[in-house]
Image (tube, helix red, strand yellow):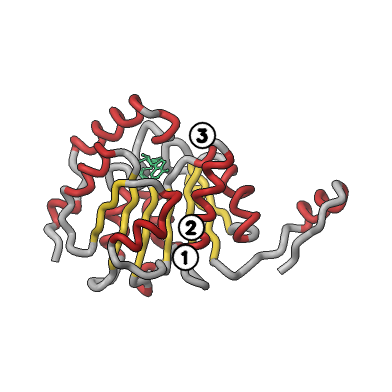
């Protein structure tokens, strides 16, 4: 079993996160790591007790990663894909046998899975800040998520703004949304299940009809 001490956040991790934000504010997207309230909300939606392969995108210094490891089965594999080399080093200190740290870009999830001999994930969780990146880059990451995820698999993205919802709608349909106010800043949690297109809300259907666009239904 993993050493519990290593599964606890260390004070240095917060400093490393803040320094990472100062160096690359748009890429990191947030001054503080996620709160434990947000962690719990994300984990509740992810159905991790049934998952064998879990992928986390943009783990930062590992707050959500620790919550995933606490909830995941002893035989699960948790692949975390982090672009920032300093954060990847911090993550490698966790030493949980289920954890695989991959320093790389979330737009190539299939490549990362192949390098580590893993199959299609049951769950993908993302903390990547879609609203501070180019739309096209965000779209590439979402295609990478959609291509990699198992049919019926869950995709969760937590975000301050709703850019991911409009990009994600093109591929996954409408998201279920919750808001966690006990986080700095308050965060929306978007959840999709691959292959389960949800009908547009009545309000949005009317808006699309007024603009003369087709209105996808389930
Ligand atoms: C808002 S932080 C989330 C950190 C952590 N998951 C948390 O909740 O505290 C966003 C993270 O996404 C990472 N990131 C941004 N773009 C990325 C990309 N294209 N591929 C992988 N990681 C990326 C950043 O380096 C940063 O660690």
Disc 2 crowd, CA 10 A, few/some/many (<14, 14-19, 20+): many
Residue at 52% x, 60% y: name it.
146
Toward the viewer: 131 or 9? 131
Residue 50 location, quadrant: bottom left
Disc 3 crowd, CA 10 A, few/some/many (<14, 14-19, 20+): some
Distance between the alpha carbons at the discs numbered 1 and 3: 24 Å
Distance between the alpha carbons at the discs numbered 1 and 2: 6 Å
Provide the residue designation for mark 2. Answer: 145
Q: What label does residue 149 carry, if any?
A: 1
**Is the shortest distance between ligand 1 and the CB of mark 1 under 8 Å?**
no
Q: Do the numbered discs 1 and 3 sit on residues whose CB atoms are within 8 Å?
A: no
Q: Position of residue 83 (x, y in %)?
A: 34, 42
Q: Position of residue 3 (x, y in %)?
A: 12, 58
**Height in image: 45 above or below 51?**
above
Residue at 30% x, 56% y: name it.
67
Provide the residue designation for mark 3. Answer: 132
Residue at 46% x, 63% y: name it.
148
């Amino acid at each position: 079993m993993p050493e519990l001490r290593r599964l606890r956040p260390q004070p240095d991790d917060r400093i490393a996160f803040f320094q990472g934000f100062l160096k690359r504010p748009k890429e990191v997207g947030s001054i503080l790591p996620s709160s434990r309230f947000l962690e719990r909300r994300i984990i509740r939606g992810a159905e991790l007790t049934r998952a064998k392969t879990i992928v986390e995108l943009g783990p930062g210094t590992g707050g959500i990663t620790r919550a995933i490891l606490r909830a995941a089965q002893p035989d699960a594999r948790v692949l975390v894909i982090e672009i920032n080399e300093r954060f990847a080093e911090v993550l490698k200190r966790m030493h949980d046998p289920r954890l695989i740290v991959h320093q790389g870009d979330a737009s190539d999830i299939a490549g990362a899975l192949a390098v580590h001999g893993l199959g299609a994930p049951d769950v993908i969780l993302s903390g990547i800040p879609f609203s501070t990146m180019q739309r096209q880059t965000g779209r590439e990451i979402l295609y990478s998520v959609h291509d990699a995820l198992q049919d019926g698999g869950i995709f969760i993205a937590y975000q301050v703004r709703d850019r991911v919802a409009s990009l994600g709608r093109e591929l996954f349909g409408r998201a279920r949304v919750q808001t966690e106010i006990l986080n700095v800043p308050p965060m929306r949690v978007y959840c999709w299940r691959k292959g389960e297109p949800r009908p547009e809300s009545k309000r949005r259907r009317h808006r699309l009809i007024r603009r003369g666009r087709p209105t996808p239904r389930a």
